[in-house]
Image (tube, rainbow, N blue to C red):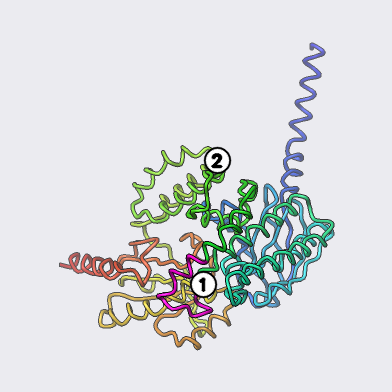
Amino acid sequence: MNFVYYKLLKYWTCFLLLTPFLLHANSSIKKVHLRGTLINFSNQVFIEDISDLKNLTTQNINRIITPDSLGNFELNFEIGKPNYFRIGRNILYLEPGDKLSMTIDYEYPENAVFSSSSKRAKEANDYLKSTPFHNAGSFLEAGLGIKETIQLTIEAILTSSKKREISLAKYSYISSKFRKLEKARINADILNSLFYIPVYFPYIHKTPADSILPFMKSYKKISDPYITKYRKSFIKSEYLPLEVFRRVIFWLANDSVIRNPFPSEISNWLTAELLAIKIKGEKRKDSLYLFLPEINNLHVNKYKQALIEKINILTNFNDGDDARDFFLTDNDNHKISLRQFKGKVIYIDIWATWCGPCLKEIPYLDALRKLYKEDSSIVFISLSIDENRELWKSALLKKNLTGYQFITSRAGLKEYNVISLPRVIIIDKDFTVAAMYGQSPSSQVIVDFLNSLLTKELMKKN
């Protein structure tokens, strides 16, 4: 045998023998190991990926925690690179290979306790405990940060941002990438707070309706220089993993202060997000394929792949398909199957006690119930996905909620791809999906849609 050929054969034989071990080793590096105790959570907890792919993909069911009766859990799952996740109201930053122990109380996220052999992992997650909530206006804290004037409110925002900067500087073991991202988060929280001033200021100060226009003119005059300052050299695609940064991008995309186009990857993300909304709202399965040309025009491959996967999932199970059964639990802890309602039009309003827009829909759902109270061929189900069952029960009493009130886990609805709330699912009498993403109770067209379903069923009988 030729000597060179022999050496090559020997090399490739060794490589092939080692490949399984190399792959296994590489796989283990990509895993994170979480363990600890969850307090005031439900019996199933979802670890949510909150990266820039959050709305473009289907969340991974391998990241579901099932704590024992004491709230203890242990979970392994794979990640390809450092990423932000959410458990309850706590944000986590995880890197491949991390082993993190935690005690998290859903009601008090700032009291979470983390431990790890990696000082980097512990410090990163300790810092994140006090992350401002972007949906509450970041440093405005749902209106608590509003002061007597617009100028004083802005100064308070900047004071809060300085405190975050000082806090971040105290951590010496965090990675340079994490530090850079969190500095960008502070900047994004400033901008987000500035954009939220018109939301909270008139409400806190009870500004009369005829004074809103002068207020907005004053707000723009005072805030525009700050917005210009803090957006300068800030709009970078490397910050897309931050939820608050992405919120700011949406604000800025519609603000007159913007003079320059976004970088290409950010523009691609914006296009992908808008496509995801359109795809979610498409009722006909065969029409979903019409989005493929637009998806193929995206040059960021991860966005393209995520949307194609979303279309594949939706074409597999969508409007017109047989409904997938799942279990619902009532206030007395009795479980029933959704299929028990077969033979009726089933309107399912999915909500949670922490979802503000969901709570606004409750009176409209009650109005729908009353409108159809004499029609036994339709049923309205209020379905909570709260992780904390006691909070849900408390809300039922406090708000005097009537009708069919049930709770289930988000995992129990995995085939319905319930990611964001509010969400409505409508099922025909023959137990087929009439609307995977149905109109909300407050919609002006929902009554016409329900009447069309009831009329269709009546026509079938005749």
Circle 1 — which element? loop
Q: Is residue 249 left or right of residue 9?
A: left
- Per the image, the residue denoted by label 2 is 264
- Per the image, the residue denoted by label 1 is 355
Which one is nearer the viewer's eye here, 71 or 194?
A: 194
At x 49%, y 55%, the residue is 255
Residue 316 lies, with reference to residue 123, above or below; the image says above
Which one is nearer the viewer's eye here, 269 or 374?
A: 269
Task: Answer with mark 1 or mark 2, whichever residue precedes in sequence.
Answer: 2
| Residue 446 horizontal/vertical position (percent) | 31, 68
Tell me which segment is drawn in magenta: 202-218
Q: Is residue 104 left or right of residue 254?
A: right
Which one is nearer the viewer's eye here, 249 or 41?
A: 249
Quadrant in which the C terminus appears: bottom left
| Residue 158 horizontal/vertical position (percent) | 68, 65
| Residue 302 appears in the rendering | no
At x 76%, y 40%, the residue is 21
| Residue 191 appears in the rendering | yes
Under mark 1, the amino acid is Cys
Magenta stretch: includes residue 261: no
User: Which-is-in-front pick, marks 1 and 2?
Assistant: 2
